[in-house]
Amino acid sequence: MGYSNLAYKDYFDEQVKTTEPVQKNTGVRRRKKIKNFKPIVYALILSAAAYFMISKNVALYETQQTIKSKQAELTELETYTSQRTFELEQSADLTTIEQIATTRLNMQRPEQYQIEYVSIDREDVTEVTSGEVEGVKNKVNKAADSFKKNIIGIFTLGIK
């Protein structure tokens, strides 16, 4: 036992001593990496939230601009429609029609001998009552209501 190699034993002890602190340092390094990683994650979350808020505001702004342009277009079309309506009402004036008929078309008013009067007896008069006029609408509404009830009835049979 006196002839053993002490150098090997010291080398082995030094290697064990040097490996233990390295293992402790790796745990500290991992904690530092995790600590360094958290701000990055927070920054990414914050930037994603900012992106979504900005994109929402941009979409809102674009929608508002579209609404403004459509409202401007609507007012323009309303003025055009009112002008055309005015022109149409003027063209439907009886004096204007008579003037166009006499000047452009060379028409004349009928003479007294050309006019014939037709008398209609009261028996020949046809009246349409409101019940018959609304009857078609009522029939369509009743048919739609019964169709809805049938569809609802089909789906409620399985629930009971």
Image: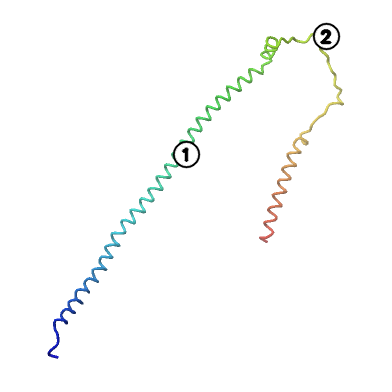
Residue indicated by mark 1: 63
Residue indicated by mark 2: 113
Q: Position of residue 17 (x, y in %)?
A: 19, 76
Q: Quadrant of residue 132?
A: top right
- Looking at numbered disc 1 in the image, what kind of residue is underneath it? Thr
| Colour scheme in use | rainbow
Answer with mark 1 or mark 2, whichever residue precedes in sequence: 1
66 sits left or right of 154 in the view? left
Q: Residue at 85% across / 21% down in the picture?
A: 120
Task: Tell me how far mark 1 sits from mark 2, CA to CA.
Answer: 70 Å
Work out whether 81 lies above or below 49.
above
Q: Which residue is most to the bottom?
A: 1
Q: Residue at 48% across / 36% down in the picture?
A: 66
Q: Position of residue 155 (x, y in %)?
A: 67, 56
89 sits left or right of 39 in the view? right
Describe the element under mark 1 as helix, strand or loop: helix
Work out whether 114 lies above or below 136.
above
